Every structure is written in C-alpha cells, then in structure tokens.
Image (tube, rainbow, N blue to C red):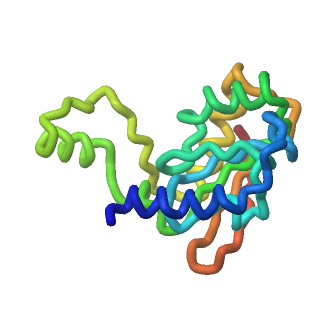
Amino acid sequence: MSVIDELLRANEAYAARFTKASLALPPGRKVAIVACMDARLDPARALGLEEGDAHVIRNAGGRVVEALRSLAISQALLGTEAVVIVHHTDCGMLTFTDDGIRQKLRQTRSADADHVAFLPFSDLDQSVRDDIAVYRSSPLVRKDIPVRGFIYDVRTGKLREVEAGQA
Ligand code: ZN
C-alpha cells in the first residue's frame, strides 16, 4: 500500500469516530501559530490544540514572511488576536544555504531559482528574533496583540521563549 493509501485508510477511521461537525469557522481560541513543517513537531499535540482551536500556518523554518498572507486573513477575517512563532532545534534550515539549494535545483531540475529566497538561517534564536521583527514591520498584521516566539526542543518536547529584543 502506498503512503497516500495508508493516509486514506487512516482517514476512514478518523471520520468514522468524528464528532465535531458543528465547529465554527473562526478559531475558537483566537490564536494563530506559525511553525516549521518539521515532521517531529506536532503543534496540536505539543500545544494542546483540538480541531477548531487555532490556525496553524506551517512552512520550512516557520518563517513569518511566508506566512504574512495567511496571518492577515486570520486576523482581518477570522478574528485571531494572538500569534505564536515556533522554530525548533535541529532544524533543516540550519543545514543549507541559498547558493547550495539553488545549485542543487539547477543540477537536478535544470531550474533557475536564483530569484527565490529559501530563507535558511545559521542562528536559531536570531531566526526567531528576525521573524518577530518581520511581523512587526508588516503593515498587513495587527500590532496591538501578543506576538511571541519560541524554540521547540525536538529532544524534550519543551518550548523555550526567545525574547524579541529590539526590532
Ligand atoms: Zn525546521
């Protein structure tokens, strides 16, 4: 069985015991989470979220610049009023450079990615501070709500807050 077929089988079981048909569209706990897509990080389990609770916006690195469109929609149309940014230890974004991945895409796909910023980073704490600064500098999102950044430890499951510092 392919992995996608395995997912479909799991979904049948999920739907068979599904009881949340009447959830509202806006997130019940009025929070949006921007998190890395890393497979070891499960925001719902790590943060105690249920269906209907939160927007979880994920991408490689949990970079805010790539999440601004979603955050603007989340806040302006769906009423979220807190933002949590979650990067994590041992992140893949620490392991490559823009030049490196551009070269790889050129070799393997004949793709010109010179105009793409893949947003890797070399300092984990700084990457969180940078993303809080990106948030603060965007006119699309609210400045009157809590925005806090964290590093999730993939060895312990714990979150550690990164102080924003001067934006
Ligand atoms: Zn990551």
Q: Nearer the viewer, residue 140 or 59?
A: 59
**Residue 124 in the image: x percent, y percent?**
55, 58
Is 131 positioned to the left or the right of 141 in the image?
A: left
Residue at figure coordinates x 67%, y 25% from the top left: 138
Q: How many marks?
A: 0
The picture places residue 83, in percent across and down from the top left corner, at: 76, 43
Is 99 placed left or right of 29 in the picture?
A: left
Q: Nearer the viewer, residue 43 or 154?
A: 43
Measuring 32% from the left and 49% from the top, which residue is drawn there? 97
Which residue extends farthest top?
139
Q: Nearer the viewer, residue 135 or 28?
A: 28
Q: Position of residue 5 (x, y in %)?
A: 40, 58
Q: Position of residue 29 (x, y in %)?
A: 86, 46
The N terminus sits in image quarter: bottom left
Residue occupying image coordinates x 32% and y 43%: 98
Residue furthest toward the front?
16
Q: In the shown orientation, is residue 11 left or right of residue 52? A: left
Q: Is residue 28 above or below residue 37?
A: above
Q: Residue at x 24, y 48 (%)?
A: 100
Q: Quadrant of the C terminus?
A: top right
